[in-house]
Amino acid sequence: MKTLACDAIDLKILQILQEDGRIRFRELAEKVSLSSSPCLTRVRRLETAGIIKGYMAVVDVSKLQSHIEIYTEISLVQQGNHRQTAFLQYVRARPQLVELLEISGRCDYLGRFACGSLSEYQVIVDHLLESPALGVANVTSHIVMRTVKPNRGFDLKSSSRSP
């Protein structure tokens, strides 16, 4: 995969857009010391290269409805076979699944579920464990008690970080 070379201005643009995706181009241009046209050209180039994947609103679901979030470690019996395909098809079809990462370590996947109730989540877990076609060996659940630091994007301000 070819990567796009980003300079300090590109990184600053990306950092600002992560913090405020609705910022006006004129204001963004001022913050990175460019005129509007070159700033817009840079943003479009970052979008075309796939570095900016899209824009979305950060919604506080708790203000709309009661829900619980659960991080779920999922281990498969065996990777790289038809079971993995069946597993992925099943979980991708679950609207409660917010995010799924394939990871290294003691489990194969880390999922983030948002469910209306614990019993709703339990139905999903039961199906994962009881359906041999999905090939799930183990599920470990971690219920989110509260968010201490929400995701606000990646730190693109500097390449050297101190503890």
Image: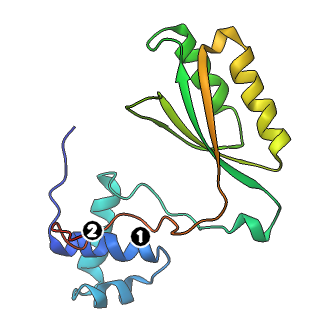
Q: Up-down: is 127 above or below 116?
A: above
In x, y percent, where is residue 3?
19, 48
Instruction: Return the x and y of residue 41 as percentages of the image width and height.
Output: 27, 70
CA gap, disc 2 and disc 1 = 10 Å
- Are the residues at dot 2 and dot 1 in contact (C-beta closer than 8 Å)? yes
Amino acid at dot 1: Gln
Secondary element type, mark 1? helix
Q: Secondary structure at mark 2?
A: loop
**In which quadrant is the C terminus drawn?**
bottom left
Most foreground residue, 88 or 146: 146
The three-letter amino acid code for the residue at tag 2 is Leu
* Mark 1, residue position: 18
In the displayed structure, 114 sits above or below 84; it is below
In the picture, the disc for residue 156 is 2
Residue 58, placed above or below residue 52: below
From what the image shows, is residue 53 above or below residue 25?
above
Q: Earlier in the sequence, mark 2 or mark 1?
A: 1
Q: Is residue 145 left or right of residue 77?
A: right
Of residue 90 and residue 69, the one placed in the foreground of this image is 69
